[in-house]
Amino acid sequence: MQVTIVDAFTQTAGAGNRAGVVLDAAGLSVEAMQRIATAVGASETAFVVSGPTAQGVRLRYFTPTVEIDFCGHATVASFHLMAERGLVPRSGALKLECAAGVLDVELEATSTRGSRAWIVTPRHPWLETPVPLEQVLALVGGTVDMVDGSLPVRRNAHRVMVPFRRREDVWELAPRSGALDTLLRPHGVSGVYFFTRETLEAGSVAHSRYFVPGMGVAEDPVTGSAAGPLGMYLAMHGVLPLPAEGGTVRARIEQGDAIGKPGRIEVEVTGRAGQPERARIGGVAVTVLDGTLHV
C-alpha cells in the first residue's frame, strides 16, 4: 500500500502536524484503514475513498486507535498532495465529503508552486463544560489562577476549550494522558484545548496546545479542526471583532511551538459583530516522503 507522509500547516519538513495520506483507498476495508493508520503512527491518516473528480473528493480519517469524523491537518495534507500530483487544480472550489458532512474547500495557488487549502469547518453548539475544571487542571499540571477569567470555558463537539492568561503557563502543561482520558471519557469528551491571547508573533490572535487522549493522541501538534471553532469563539466574545454591518476577518493561530513542531493556521471568520456564521481554516503543507507500507 502506497502511503505519503505530509507535514501540514508548515512548509518545513519535520514541523507542523504530520499526516499520512493514502490516495487510492477505494477498495480498503475499515479494518485495513485502521491497521494502516496505526502503522503510520501519525496523529491522523487520511484515506481518499472516492475521487478526486471535478466535483470533489471523499475522505475518511483514522487516528492510530479510532476513526474520526473530520481532521483539519489531514485534509490540508490531502488537498496539498492531490494538487501537487495534478489530480486537482491548484486553485478553485471543490467539495469535501466526509463523516462530518459535505464541506466547501477552496484551493489558492501560492508563490511556491503549491496550494493553500481553505476548508469550512463543521459547526457544533457551545455548551458548558461537563467536567469540573479543577479536576482537568490537576491532571495537566495547571491551576485555576492560570485561567483567563475574562473568557468562558466551553465545550465544543468532543473537546473542552480553556482560555489561559499567559503563554508560559500553556507551555508548562504536562498532561497525565491515561488519567485525563479516564476523567473525560464518561462525558463523551476526547480532549482539552488550551489557548492564550499571548502570542509569539504580532500577527497572531492566539497560541494553543491540544491534548487528545481519547483519540490515542497525547498531544496534537497543530489542530485545524479546533482552530475553526476557536475563531468562532473569539469572534463571539469580541477578541476577533467582526463589522457590525457584517463581513469577514482573518487571523492566525499558533500551535506546536511548545513541542518543537511549530505550525500556523490561518482562520477566516464571516458574520456580524458578536454573531459569527462561518469559519474557514487555511493552511499549506510539504510532502516529506513516499513509501510502500506492508501491513
Image: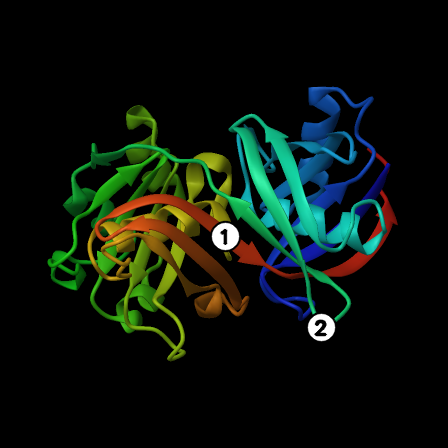
* Place of residue 53 in the rendered image (x, y in percent of width and height, measured from the top left): 79, 34
Looking at the image, residue 100 sits to the left or right of residue 24; the answer is: left
Above or below, comparing residue 148 to residue 129 in the picture: below
Position in image of residue 262 (x %, y %): 52, 68
Q: Is residue 31 left or right of residue 237?
A: right
| Mark 2 burial class by Cα count in 10 Å: few <14, some 14-19, many 20+ | few
**Circle 2 sits in a helix, a strand or a loop, which is it?**
loop
The three-letter amino acid code for the residue at tag 1 is Ile
| Of the image marks 2 and 1, the number of the one nearer the N terminus | 2
Identify the residue position indicated by label 2 in the image. Answer: 111
Q: Quadrant of the C terminus?
A: top right
Q: Which residue is mark 1?
A: 281
The front one of 270 and 12 is 270
Q: Label 1: few (<14), some or many (≥20) within 10 Å? A: many
Q: Residue at x 43, y 43 (%)?
A: 212
Front tag of 2 and 1:
2
Q: Secondary structure at mark 1?
A: strand
Give the amino acid at mark 2. Ser
State which quadrant residue 46 falls in: top right
Whether the residues at callouts 2 and 1 have beta carbons within 8 Å, the answer is no
Is residue 8 in view? Answer: yes
Mark linked to residue 25 = none
Identify the residue at horizontal 31%, vertical 34% (top origin): 184
**Residue 277 vs residue 163, the one in the foreground:** 277
Seen from the viewer's position, the closer of residues 262 and 264 is 264
